[in-house]
């Protein structure tokens, strides 16, 4: 399956869950913004970048590329997005992580071992209150 197709599926899954949770979800009409979706709750708007992964390493870590660009990788900034929504497909779980918590162009999430990202496991409430 092509990466654009995988990304579209993740966006649709995220949108469905967000709408079921009562959020308003909007998608830009063109595909060159740094965010994939706008999620609104009350008066709070969040620009959300969706990422997904379907494989893990031998230690159970899921590597996620949290940068943009094909040849020259660039980090996202607070000026571009507010939150990452990271989908771990084999576990069917989401990590909702504020941009301020991502310091590198790739991260590895260890769902059963690492406490670094544990607080962001299914943290949909971050879209209600805005990012910390």
Image (cartoon, grey):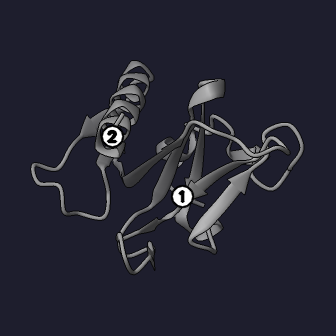
Q: Nearer the viewer, residue 80 or 131?
A: 80
Name the quadrant of the C terminus.
bottom right
Q: Position of residue 92 (x, y in %)?
A: 59, 24
Q: CA distance from mark 1 to mark 2?
A: 32 Å
Q: Position of residue 26 (x, y in %)?
A: 22, 41
Helix, strand or loop at label 2? It is: loop
Residue occupied by mark 1: 131
Name the residue rendered at 43%, 78% in the picture: 74
- Local packing at callout 1 (Cα closer than 10 Å; few below 14, some 14-19, many 20+) is some
Name the quadrant of the N terminus.
top left
Q: Position of residue 118 (x, y in %)?
A: 78, 45
Residue 18 appears left or right of 131: left
Q: Position of residue 130 (x, y in %)?
A: 49, 54
Q: Relative to 113, say whether 77 is above or below.
A: below
Residue occupied by mark 2: 2
Identify the residue at the far right of this view: 113
Residue 11 appears left or right of 105: left
- Local packing at callout 2 (Cα closer than 10 Å; few below 14, some 14-19, many 20+) is few
Helix, strand or loop at label 1? It is: loop
Q: In the rendered structure, which disc, 1 or 2, sits on the residue that comes first in sequence?
A: 2
Name the residue rendered at 78%, 39% in the picture: 111
Q: Nearer the viewer, residue 23 or 27?
A: 27
Q: Quadrant of residue 14?
A: top left
Name the residue rendered at 57%, 39% in the picture: 125
Q: Quadrant of residue 35?
A: bottom left
Name the residue rendered at 53%, 65% in the picture: 99
């Amino acid at each position: 399956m092509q990466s654009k197709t995988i990304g579209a599926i993740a966006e649709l899954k995220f949108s469905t869950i967000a709408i079921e949770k009562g959020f308003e979800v909007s998608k830009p009409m063109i595909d060159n913004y740094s965010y994939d979706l706008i999620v609104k709750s009350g008066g709070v708007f969040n620009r959300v970048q969706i990422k997904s992964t379907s494989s893990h390493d031998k230690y159970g870590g899921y590597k996620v590329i949290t940068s943009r660009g094909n040849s020259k990788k660039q980090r996202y900034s607070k000026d571009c997005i507010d939150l990452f929504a990271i989908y771990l497909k084999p576990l069917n779980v989401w990590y909702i992580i504020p941009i301020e918590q991502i310091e590198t162009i790739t991260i590895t999430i260890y769902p059963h071992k690492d406490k670094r990202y544990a607080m962001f496991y299914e943290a949909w409430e971050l879209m209600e209150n805005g990012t910390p």
